[in-house]
Amino acid sequence: MFYPESTSYLAGKSKKEDYTAEKILNTIFENSNEGLLVIGENGEVRQVNNALASALKTTPDKMIGRLLTDVCKHNGLRRLIKVVNSGVPEFGKLDSIDGRSFLADYIPIISNQLIQGALAKIIFLTPEREPGYGLGEGVRKKKQASRNGLTVFYTVDHIIGNSPQMIDLKETLLKVAPRNSTVLITGESGTGKELFAQAIHAASLRRSGPFVKINCAAIPDTLLESEFFGYEEGAFTGSKRGGQIGKLEKANGGTVFLDEIGDLSFSLQAKLLRFIQDKEIQKLGASETKMSDVRVVAATNVNLDQMVKYKKFREDLYYRLNVVNLSIPPLRERKEDIRALVDCFIEKYNRLFGIQVTGLTQEVETIFQRYSWPGNVRELENVIERAFNVIEGNVICKKHLPAQLANILGSEGSNRESEDFQQENGFSLTLSEGQTLAEIMDQAEKIIILQALMKSKGNKAKAAQLLGISRPGLYKKLVKYNLA
């Protein structure tokens, strides 16, 4: 039974009222999708619902009446004992049970100013794993996200990386995901911004709703407004019979992911701002508006601060989008994650190619650590996939890598590549016997370009500005020095 005698809500009511209220509370308790657990002041389990018991691989009847410390060895849930002793609630605690991440609130139950027990309320953030469900499968087990058939493939468990930056990012993601605040994801191309957007949706309370993606750079401006808001029949020449529903309306009850938000035209920025503020949609050609309850997650690989400064992005929209900012670091700033990413991609392509690659040679590992990875995680995956196409045997060797990587150790000591310089305090030139002045000048130019790229955090437009050259001119030099 629920633990009604510990709640002040029932105090002073008649027995009939007590019974009715207790039935209501028990019905809510047993049918909740959240995990719920109540213990008494002595740590004895008074109530647990099926959602939590099944996650613990047991049943409620095997837990009720026993001490929490006996039936649950999980450290997170045992926080309840601390809450009973202190009377201080703990909210938003991140933990996991058998790999399933959850956020938990631990709340003391107080009656007549005495602590009678405590309640744990748990929101599971990742779906229970099914056989074959994992990162990078060619055809993954899909999480059905809506009646419209819109799905997400990734959860926070698919974000690979144990570097301090990534651990902090994942913890922040799990804290903000259950809320409805707008999120802006920033990072260079190839860092995995859509992966983070899908993980936010999968960890949110909207996860049973649709996840709708709009690529603001891939659709012409003339069509983008109808893509956002939809249109009525006859709204313009060539419109479909019956009109079309817009993606902001299609995402009702779920999440809309606005990728490459920095490429949105100024006129559409104003309309998007109004939607974020009012949640109202007006189709092209329509006279009436309708509401759409949508959480907005946006992403960009450009510096919106600079765009706002130069009046290329609306300042009011920027502040509406930038409520919570998740800045994904480039791979060159978290090289301790390369090994885990490589293992993950090897596992993926072993399944896809039907072979059994076991790992890398030490030489390849050294190359991976010294390379600057301008294409970030996407480039790393492409390198692994290429190796699988040409591999002989079961170990990836230097000869299986593309030229720009295979040659990175070519002139050790005289022409070390970018990462050798980046890992040192500052940059230096080494003069070797037989070098011409032209070669020395090329080496110096390459170092300066690398410094500019580091100072601009990989933003090539900003790097070109720092160097006082055009962006096409910078790209030519990047190709020349195998930095593209």
Image (tube, grey):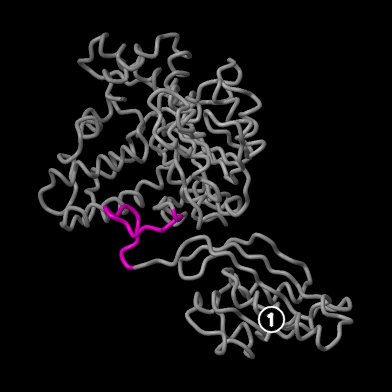
- Residue 25 image point, x, y percent: 70, 77
- Residue 50 image point, x, y percent: 55, 79
Compared to 465, does 360 lie above or below?
below
Front-lying residue, 349 or 410: 349
133 in the magenta segment = yes
Front-lying residue, 268 or 360: 268
* Mark 1 Cα-neighbour bin, 10 Å: few <14, some 14–19, many ≥20: many
Compared to 193, does 419 lie above or below?
above
Give residue 410's quadrant in the image: top left
- Note whether residue 247 is visible: yes
The amino acid at mark 1 is Ile
Give residue 42's quadrant in the image: bottom right
Residue at the location (23% across, 49% down)?
Answer: 360
Q: Name the residue under label 1.
A: 39
Q: What stretch is highlighted in magenta?
A: 131-147
Q: Is residue 57 left or right of residue 343?
A: right
Q: Is residue 370 left or right of residue 179?
A: left
Residue at the location (44% across, 67% down)?
Answer: 128
* Quadrant for the N terminus in the image: bottom right
- Residue 97 image point, x, y percent: 50, 70
Residue at the location (40% across, 35% down)?
Answer: 241
Front-lying residue, 404 or 277: 277
Compared to 214, does 482 lie above or below?
above
* Quadrant for the C terminus in the image: top left
